[in-house]
Image (spheres, rainbow, N blue to C red):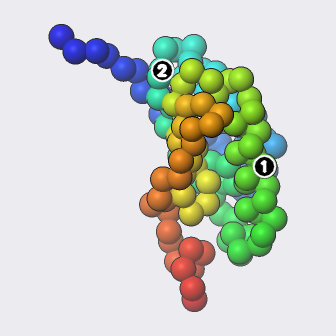
Amino acid sequence: MGRKVTVATCALNQWALDFEGNLQRILKSIEIAKHKGAKYRLGPELEICGYGCWDHYYESDTLLHSLQVLAALLESPVTQDIICDVGISSCAMWGHTLHKWEPRPSHHTHSPFFTSW
């Protein structure tokens, strides 16, 4: 018999542009996934900035704050020993150590927010 892997997926109650609150909910979901023995945690698209940002997707500070949340996740000991797939605008990031994170193209490309009008 082959090896078994536990995968955790979550649907978080994320708020648009609530970067600190969204970060805390992401960290909590990772803690729960690890507690239940998961080796891979899959989060929803746009879980860092939240859905419904409308024209804020075009603002540079939305990307800046999203990257700050991603940096906080990278620095957190909670993200160690588990592969995390974290949704950010226009892509998702996945990785398992501070030095091994890669972008994954996003499926959330609804017009008009991710294409030119």
Q: Is residue 40 left or right of residue 3?
A: right
Q: Is residue 85 above or below residue 29?
A: below
Q: Is residue 28 visible?
A: no
Q: CA distance from mark 1 to mark 2?
A: 25 Å
In this rendering, the count of numbered labels is 2
Q: Is residue 92 left or right of residue 98?
A: left
The C terminus lies in quadrant:
bottom right
Residue type at numbered disc 1: Gln
For numbered disc 1, what is the local secondary structure?
helix
> Pointer 1 and pointer 2: residues touching (CB < 8 Å)?
no
Q: Badge 1 is on which residue?
A: 68
| Residue situated in front as seen by the camera: 68 or 111 | 68
Q: Nearer the N terminus, badge 1 or badge 2?
A: 2
Q: Is residue 20 left or right of residue 35?
A: right
Residue at figure coordinates x 69%, y 69% from the top left: 57
Residue type at numbered disc 2: Ala
The image quarter in which residue 97 lies: top right
The N terminus lies in quadrant:
top left
Q: Badge 2 is on which residue?
A: 38
For numbered disc 2, what is the local secondary structure?
loop
